[in-house]
Amino acid sequence: MNRKELFEQIKSKQSYLCIGLDTDLSKIPSHLLQAEDPIFEFNKAIINATSDLCVAYKPNLAFYESQGSKGWRSLEKTMEIIPRNIFTIADAKRGDIGNTSTLYAQAFFKQMNFDSVTVAPYMGIDSVKPFLAFENRWVILLALTSNEGANDFQFNQQEGGGMLFQDVMRKAQTWGHPDQLMFVCGATQAEQFEKLRAMAPDSFFLVPGVGAQGGDLATISRLGMNKYCGLLVNSSRQIIYASKGKDFAEAAREEALKVQQEMSGLLAELIL
């Protein structure tokens, strides 16, 4: 999916919602644990209930890898039922070099057919460039994250001025262009969003941290939107675990609808 196609989906659905499929066996409704593949059954119900309200799904691979080969099969089956007009993100945070990165890229883009993968930039260009070699696939590079530990390194002052996350964003834009490179920018870092957008005016940002982590959708949208919207705002726990009962899919839809309706208003106000 290219940037134009992604923006068309945003306009069509009046939404820039990304739903995180962080499917934890300890949190899903207990009645599903009797199924042959509880993870897939949960994901299928969530997707069926919310696919008209979101433009992206983001499985966090830890929840699947932790289950071994059975978890990988759950992920494969999940990918098979996600509508092709919905952008898919492998939240894998890979970051190795050379042939290793190439094989990771083949795994996610060719074998699993994801549209994008999250990548850690610490090892530099040779850990990122292999992912950029795939047409109409995206690298989503960690830039300024929403977790508390972001303060350990990402705000470190650099010799030439500015902070480490700014160096990452500047340098990465010499490796790829806005049709293949996005940045992870956490919603809990709202005070930085004007600076982030000024540094990457045409790029899409994947924005975690809205909802359970406390990020404010309206603030992020007003500071971070560009003419293509330029935001994929992720919500995981607030939506998929809205209920632990047999009504979990309906409850997830209600929460997703609330977010989508707010997004529709913000899109109308800011760009459409």
Image (tube, helix red, strand yellow):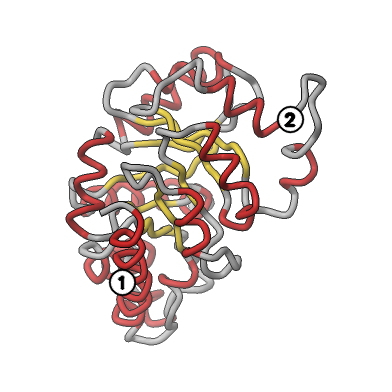
Q: Which residue is mark 1?
A: 261
Q: Quadrant of residue 245?
A: bottom left
Residue type pointed to by label 2: Gly
Percent from the top left, x then y, of residue 254? Answer: 32, 80
Q: Quadrant of residue 157?
A: top right
- Tags 2 and 1 touching, CB below 8 Å: no
Percent from the top left, x then y, of residue 47? Answer: 27, 63
Element at label 1: helix
Residue 109 drawn above or below residue 43: above
Q: Which mark is residue 162?
A: 2
Q: Residue at x 53, y 50 (%)?
A: 62
Element at label 2: loop
Percent from the top left, x then y, of residue 241? Answer: 45, 75
Residue 53 drawn above or below residue 221: below
Whether residue 160 sits left or right of residue 204 in the image: it is: right
Percent from the top left, x then y, of residue 37? Answer: 34, 63
Q: Which mark is residue 103?
A: none
Residue 188 drawn above or below residue 121: below
Q: Residue at x 63, y 47 (%)?
A: 192
Depth check, mark 2 against mark 1: the one in front is 2
Residue 183 drawn above or below residue 84: above
Graded by Cα atoms within 10 Å as few (under 14), some (14 to 19) or many (20 or more), the crowding at tag 1 reads some
Whichever of callouts 2 and 1 sits on the residue coming sooner in the sequence is: 2
Q: Quadrant of the N terminus?
A: top left
Residue type pointed to by label 1: Gln
Whether residue 170 sits left or right of residue 179 in the image: it is: right
In front: 89, or 187? 187
Q: Quadrant of the C terminus?
A: bottom left
Q: Residue at x 36, y 70 (%)?
A: 262
In front: 95, or 140? 140
